[in-house]
Amino acid sequence: MSRKILVQIPSNQIQHFITKATLQKLHSFGEIEWNPYHGPFPEEELAEKLADVHTTITSWNSIPLSDSILAAANKLQLVAHMAGSVKPILPSSKVYEQGVTVLNSNYAIAVSVSESVLALILALGHKIIPTQKLMSTHMLWKTSAIDIESYELRGRTVGLIGLGMVAQEVIKLLQPFDINIVGYDPFFPKEVANELNITLLPLHDVLSQAHIISLHAPQIPETYHMIGNKELALLRDQAILINTARGNLIDQCALTEHLRSKRFYAGLDVFEVEPLPLDSELRFMENVIVRPHLAGVNPNSRLRIGAMMVDEMERFYNGEPLKFEVKQAHLANMT
């Protein structure tokens, strides 16, 4: 009997994930049923569709696989998530209780996020935006504004809060700059940190010692406002703080207050309230770069997600070791 695969990605978004080569491989796996809508399946219809499905491909804004939906999915063996965290579509552990394997696309996104982190570090350190603004008003030439001289990355200490997939990609990109890396992650094995040449330290020591701090912790109860007023006060003068992870890792009110002093710089891709309100002070600060939560998603990363997930599906069908499986024990500490 042919394996049935239900693709939940909306019909007007498929081309952003699936190339001709990826599509050809996908069709070789079995019978494909596509989402005909420009949005998610209606919940009742999804439950009916999943009744005889072996594999479902999900993505951003897919309907969560609730207990009632999964109760109808008696033949489901694989969930392949073509997006960031799979956690939003798994509201309970029932999917694991039914013996379903779950795949995630975090690595495909981590590559893009790590580049965004490096871009923000360099843009802030070299004061690209304020310099351009001054140049555009003909107010600057060379030494007339010493406060916009570059802050070199070479030889600095970089602190990573959370040492998961994105942080490890950031480490790869930072290697040519001869930097010193310190990190905080209570779940990270010390022997792996040693292999990566990372010095593990308590959170407050990382914040006080690093010239550049980049946040990569998951959004879990223990990390809510882990960077508050006390922690921000520990940052060195002229430090650079990057957050491409989750907005509520930082107490945004405290951050705004500290940034008013212009004592340090911040590159922010995520916020406690999204979209960032139009009147937010963060939008207008000279020592801040803000972006609308797009560090990990672009045309290249979406196509990488599609190709990577289809390759992983092939490994699953062939009984080969998986690279991107999400075990139940890992789900709790995911964003």
Image (cartoon, rainbow, N blue to C red):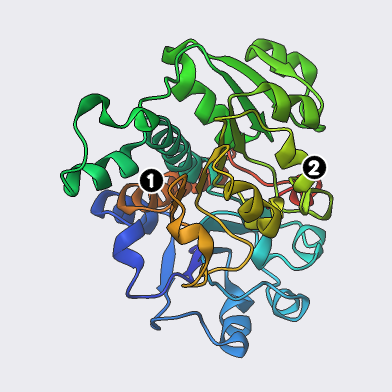
Q: Is residue 320 visible?
A: no
Q: Is residue 15 left or right of residue 2?
A: left
Q: Nearer the viewer, residue 136 or 126?
A: 136
Q: Earlier in the sequence, mark 1 or mark 2?
A: 2
Q: Which residue is labeled 1 in the image?
A: 304
Neighbor class of circle 1 (other Cα within 10 Å; few <14, some 14-19, many 20+) is many
Q: Residue furthest front?
A: 144
Q: Residue at x 81, y 62 (%)?
A: 93
Q: Nearer the viewer, residue 87 or 245?
A: 245
SS for dot 1: helix
Neighbor class of circle 2 (other Cα within 10 Å; few <14, some 14-19, many 20+) is few
Q: Residue at x 75, y 68 (%)?
A: 91
Mark number, residue 230: 2
Whole-percent x and y of residue 97?
Answer: 82, 60
| Cα separation between marks 1 and 2 | 40 Å
Mark number, residue 318: none
Whole-percent x and y of residue 173?
Answer: 44, 24
What's under tag 1, amino acid-wise? Answer: Arg
Whole-percent x and y of residue 131?
Answer: 28, 39
Q: Residue at x 73, y 75 (%)?
A: 66
Q: How many numbered callouts?
A: 2
- Does 335 sit above or below residue 76? above
Where is residue 118, by image quadrant?
top left
Whole-percent x and y of residue 275?
Answer: 51, 70
What's under tag 2, amino acid-wise? Answer: Lys
Q: Nearer the viewer, residue 22 or 191?
A: 191
